[in-house]
C-alpha cells in the first residue's frame, strides 16, 4: 500500500511539476520567439535605412563599383540573404546580389527568394529626386536555431527536476512515512471488521503522531456512538409504534374527509348544472369581470344568444364594448362609472350586435361581489337577458295605442 501511495504521489508531483515547468517554458519560448522576431524585423528595417541612404549618391552618378561596395559591406551581416536594386518603372533588378550556399556574396541577374525569407523595400531618393528602390531579404534560420536550443534546454531542465523530486519523495516515504501509514491502514481494516479494541502503537510528535491519536479518538467516539445508537434504536422502535397508531387514526379521519369532500363536489356540480340549465332556459348569459386586471368570463349561453359559438371571441370588457350599439355606448358607460363610484346599482337595457349583424335588446344586471380596501368594486358579476321579444311586444302595444 505504501509503495503504491509513494508511486502515486511521485507521479502526481512529477505531472504537476512538468505541467508548471511546461507552462513557464512555453511562455519563455513565446517571449523569446517574439523577441527574436522583433530583432529580425528591426535588423531588416535598419539595413533598408542604411542602404537607401548609402546608395543614393553612387546610384545617381551611375557608379557601379560604389553600389557594389555598399551592398557587400551591408551583407557582411549574415542574416541578409539578398539585395536588389530596381530603377523607377523597371521590373527586372538593375543590381542583384545573393548569398551562395557556401555563404559567399555573389552578383546575379535575378534573385529567387525562398518562402521563409522576410523582405521589404525602400525608395532611394537623391536630394528630392526618386531614383529607384532597394529590396532586402533576410533569413530567420538563426532565430529557429536559437529557439530549438532553448526548447532542448527547457526539456532537459524539466526532466532533471522531475528525477530529483521523485528521488526525494521516494526517500521520504521509504524511511519516514511507509511504516506509520501501514499501521494506520491495518487499524482501519480491523475497525472495518468490527474490532474497535485494536490499539495503535505510535509514539511520534509529528503530523503522523497527531493523526494516529486522532484515529484512536475517532475509534473511541465510534464505540460510544454505537452504544448510543443502540439506545436510540430502542427508543425509535417505541416511537414508531406510537406514531403508527396515530397515523392509522389520522388516515381514518382523512378517508372520511375525502368522502365528505367528494359529496360536496358532487353537490356543487349538480348545482352548477341546474344553474346553467336555468340560464339556458331563460335565455340568460352569465358574465364575470375583474375590474383591476381586466380579465372576464362569459358563459356559453352568453355567446349562443348572440349567434356565436362558446369562446368564439375573447371574453373581455373591450369585446363587450365593441358589440354595443353606438347609441347605447355613452349612456351605459356613464351608468357603469356610477356603479364603480358606488353611486347607483348597475342595471341597464341596451342593444348588442349578433353574429349575423342584427341587434338584440339585452337587460344587463350587475353587482360587485369583491371590493377594495377603499370600498371600490374589484370584481363584478352579472347577467345578460335577451328581452328582444319583450321590446317588440312593447313597440306593438305602443303602435296599437296610437
Image (cartoon, grey):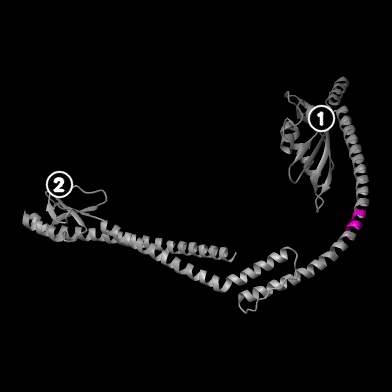
In the image, what residue occupies the spot 73% across and 31% down? Answer: 323
Distance of mark 2 from mark 1, alpha carbons? 100 Å
From the image, tell me which residue sits under label 2: 110
User: Dot 2 lies on which element?
Assistant: loop
Q: Is residue 310 visible?
A: yes
Tell which of 73 and 391 is nearer to you: 73
Q: Magenta part mainly helix, strand or loop?
A: helix
Crowdedness near tag 1: few (<14), some (14–19) or many (≥20) residues, C-alpha within 10 Å = many
Locate residue 112, reporting x and y percent.
Answer: 19, 47
Q: Quadrant of residue 154?
A: bottom left
Tell which of 110 and 197 is nearer to you: 197
Locate residue 140, reporting x and y percent.
Answer: 26, 56
Determine whether 367 is above or below 357 in the image. Answer: below
Inspect the magenta stretch and tell me whether residue 240 lies in it.
Answer: yes
Determine whether 123 is above or below 220 in the image. Answer: above
From the image, tell me which residue sits under label 1: 301
Locate residue 219, reporting x and y percent.
Answer: 73, 70
Q: Is residue 347 visible?
A: no
Q: Viewer-nearest of labels 2 and 1?
A: 2
Q: Is residue 293 left or right of residue 147?
A: right
From which residue to which does the magenta span run? Answer: 239-245
Q: Is residue 126 left or right of residue 190?
A: left
Q: Quadrant of residue 222?
A: bottom right
Q: Quadrant of residue 92?
A: top left
Crowdedness near tag 2: few (<14), some (14–19) or many (≥20) residues, C-alpha within 10 Å = some
- Quarter the N terminus occupies: bottom right
Amino acid at each position: 500500500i505504501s509503495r503504491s501511495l509513494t508511486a502515486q504521489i511521485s507521479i502526481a508531483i512529477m505531472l504537476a511539476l512538468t505541467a508548471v515547468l511546461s507552462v513557464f517554458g512555453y511562455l519563455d519560448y513565446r517571449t523569446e520567439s517574439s523577441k527574436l522576431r522583433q530583432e529580425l524585423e528591426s535588423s531588416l528595417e535598419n539595413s533598408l535605412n542604411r542602404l537607401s541612404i548609402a546608395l543614393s549618391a553612387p546610384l545617381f552618378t551611375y557608379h557601379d563599383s560604389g553600389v557594389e561596395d555598399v551592398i557587400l559591406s551591408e551583407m557582411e551581416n549574415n542574416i541578409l540573404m539578398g539585395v536588389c536594386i530596381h530603377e523607377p518603372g523597371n521590373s527586372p533588378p538593375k543590381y542583384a546580389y545573393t548569398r551562395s550556399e557556401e555563404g559567399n556574396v555573389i552578383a546575379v541577374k535575378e534573385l529567387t527568394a525562398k518562402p521563409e525569407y522576410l523582405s521589404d523595400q525602400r525608395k532611394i531618393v537623391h536630394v528630392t529626386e526618386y531614383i529607384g528602390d532597394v529590396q532586402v531579404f533576410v533569413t530567420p534560420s538563426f532565430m529557429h536555431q536559437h529557439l530549438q536550443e532553448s526548447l532542448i534546454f527547457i526539456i532537459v531542465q524539466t526532466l532533471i527536476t522531475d528525477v530529483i523530486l521523485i528521488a526525494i519523495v521516494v526517500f521520504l516515504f521509504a524511511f519516514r512515512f511507509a511504516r506509520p501509514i501501514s499501521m494506520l491502514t491495518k487499524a482501519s481494516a480491523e475497525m472495518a471488521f468490527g474490532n474497535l479494541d485494536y490499539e495503535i502503537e505510535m509514539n511520534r510528535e509529528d503530523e503522523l503522531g497527531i493523526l494516529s491519536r486522532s484515529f484512536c479518538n475517532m475509534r473511541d467516539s465510534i464505540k460510544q456512538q454505537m452504544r448510543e445508537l443502540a439506545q436510540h434504536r430502542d427508543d425509535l422502535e417505541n416511537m414508531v409504534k406510537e406514531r403508527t397508531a396515530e397515523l392509522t387514526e389520522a388516515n381514518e379521519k382523512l378517508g372520511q374527509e375525502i368522502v365528505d369532500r367528494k359529496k360536496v363536489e358532487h353537490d356543487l356540480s349538480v348545482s352548477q348544472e341546474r344553474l346553467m340549465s336555468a340560464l339556458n332556459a331563460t335565455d340568460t348569459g352569465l358574465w364575470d369581470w375583474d375590474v383591476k386586471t381586466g380579465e372576464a368570463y362569459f358563459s356559453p349561453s352568453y355567446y349562443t344568444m348572440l349567434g356565436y359559438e362558446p369562446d368564439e371571441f375573447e371574453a373581455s370588457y373591450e369585446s363587450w364594448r365593441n358589440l354595443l350599439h353606438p347609441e347605447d355606448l355613452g349612456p351605459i358607460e356613464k351608468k357603469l362609472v356610477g356603479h364603480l363610484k358606488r353611486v347607483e346599482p348597475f342595471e341597464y337595457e341596451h342593444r348588442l350586435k349578433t353574429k349575423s349583424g342584427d341587434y338584440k335588446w339585452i337587460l344587463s344586471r350587475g353587482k360587485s361581489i369583491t371590493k377594495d380596501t377603499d370600498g371600490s368594486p374589484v370584481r363584478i358579476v352579472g347577467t345578460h337577458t335577451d328581452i328582444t321579444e319583450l321590446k317588440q311586444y312593447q313597440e306593438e302595444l305602443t303602435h296599437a295605442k296610437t
